[in-house]
Amino acid sequence: MSRYLAPVFTVLGAIGLVYSFWLVFNDTPLQYSMQPSDRHVVLATGSGSLFFNQKIFFWHVPHAIMLFTAVGVAGVSSIAYLWKRNPKADDIALAAVQVATVFGAVTLLTGSIWAKAAWGHWWIWEKRLTMSLLLWLTLVGYLLVRRYAGASGERIAAGMAVFAMIGVPFIYTMVGAGDNHPQAGSEGNVATLNKDMMWPFWASMLTFLSWFIALTITRVQSARMEREVRELREKGLDSGVLES
Amino acid sequence: MKTILCMLVLAVASPSFAQPGSAGSAAGSGSAAPAAGSGAGSGSAAPAAGSGSAAGAGSASAGSSDPGAGSATPPPAPPVDEPTPGAHKACVAAMNIDPNFADRVIKTAELRLQDKMNSEQVLKDLCTVRMHQESQDEVATNKRHVLLAYLAMWLVAAGFVLYLWRKQQALKREIVLLRNDLDAATKDPK
């Protein structure tokens, strides 16, 4: 059953990508500003204008939410691993962190490009951006620890994943803390998004959720194969078939 | 009423009507309407006395025989393109005689007015089109960033999928090799 899950979600993601692409470019209005109250300022000064570049929202935000989801999965799996020492939980945590790193990279890249288009700067040291960068660096740190820290690296990395998970709610609620980051919807959440953008947004969310599930399952399979390789090598070394 | 329409048609039909400077003259015709109206009133009261009504409509001084018109303020100097009294007279007489002609005059006046309103609407439409064009220009300048973001997303995703695929292929090969070595060792112990 599990061997068919990844292909099924990959196909769903591919169909969703085409569909959401069509929706985003054909069925969503152009928005001047994410904050309706800013509209007159935007029109008068031209600063902070979104117009066509607001389309980036439909990839940037779903990737950010998938990043948070992946970090949550990694954190919960790491707690399970630290508690029960179950290697399967560790495989899931490793896969989730790697997928989170990819989604985080896309979030930072698309956010940076959007910032250049809307604000005129590739990067500003605003609270949410800085916290997101720190989260992503923590994930990169997790992968480096897993690669170079030896036998104890799994437990150190598990601790880092829990640390990263604790940081996610702070980043998510940072928008409401008075920073300059654009808000999704009139009240800072997607529930108050323009109704013409609601379905395209959720179509993008479901698409990237499919990608997230497909990539995580595939990466878990790889982690299990890596574990199998390690076990076979140990078996070979023990039986004298392989030399160290 | 017929006199007003007649004057309106003649004023609209004059070549200077469409020019900006003619707005004043059109207003001048309008301002002359009360005096003309009084004349028209007398005209309609006595259809047979067409000349009298025409005189009333034709010039404010002629309206001095009418107490109402006489008490009015002195008439302003006639605009340059104001229709001549003779034209008024002929027009009113023709309208009184032939109701169809009156209808045609009214229709013509309505059409001219509609043309004027249409030309104003065209100007408004042009302004709207211009505003949309400016918005589109702004939109066009931002397409580069959208494409860049889309490209970045695809590059990262494709890179990761390629990495996963290569890794899985390498692991599969390694597992097969290790299993073969272990199987061979257990079957043929030295």
Image: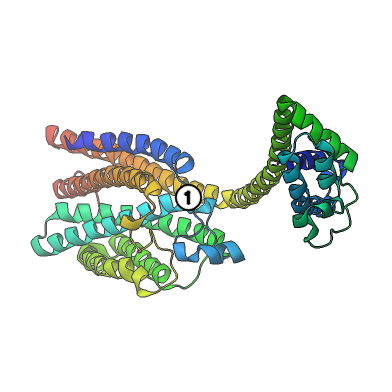
Residue B160 screen position, x and y as percent: 39, 47
- Direction from residue B61 to residue A124 in the image, left or right: left
Residue A16 screen position, x and y as percent: 35, 38
Residue B135 screen position, x and y as percent: 61, 51
Vertical relation: A124 (above or below) A103: below
**Nearer to us in this view, A125 or A205:** A205
Vertical relation: A124 (above or below) A214: below
**Nearer to us in this view, A190 or B22:** B22
- Number of labels in the image equals 1
> In which quadrant is the N terminus of chain B drawn?
top right
Residue B51 screen position, x and y as percent: 85, 38
Judging from the image, what secondary structure is the residue with disc 1 in?
helix
- Direction from residue B101 to residue A35 in the image, left or right: left
Q: Residue at x 23, y 47 (%)?
A: A220
Determine the residue located farthest toward the left in the rendered image. A84
Which chain's residue wears label 1? A
**Nearer to us in this view, A125 or B119:** B119
Q: Residue at x 41, y 57 (%)?
A: A107
Residue at numbered disc 1: A55
> In which quadrant is the C terminus of chain B drawn?
top left
Q: Is residue B44 visible?
A: yes
The crowd level at tag 1 (other Cα within 10 Å; few <14, some 14-19, many 20+) is many
Q: Residue at x 85, y 59 (%)?
A: B76
Residue B110 quadrant: top right
- Direction from residue A227 to residue A211 in the image, left or right: right
Q: Amino acid at mark 1?
A: Lys
Q: Residue at x 33, y 63 (%)?
A: A139
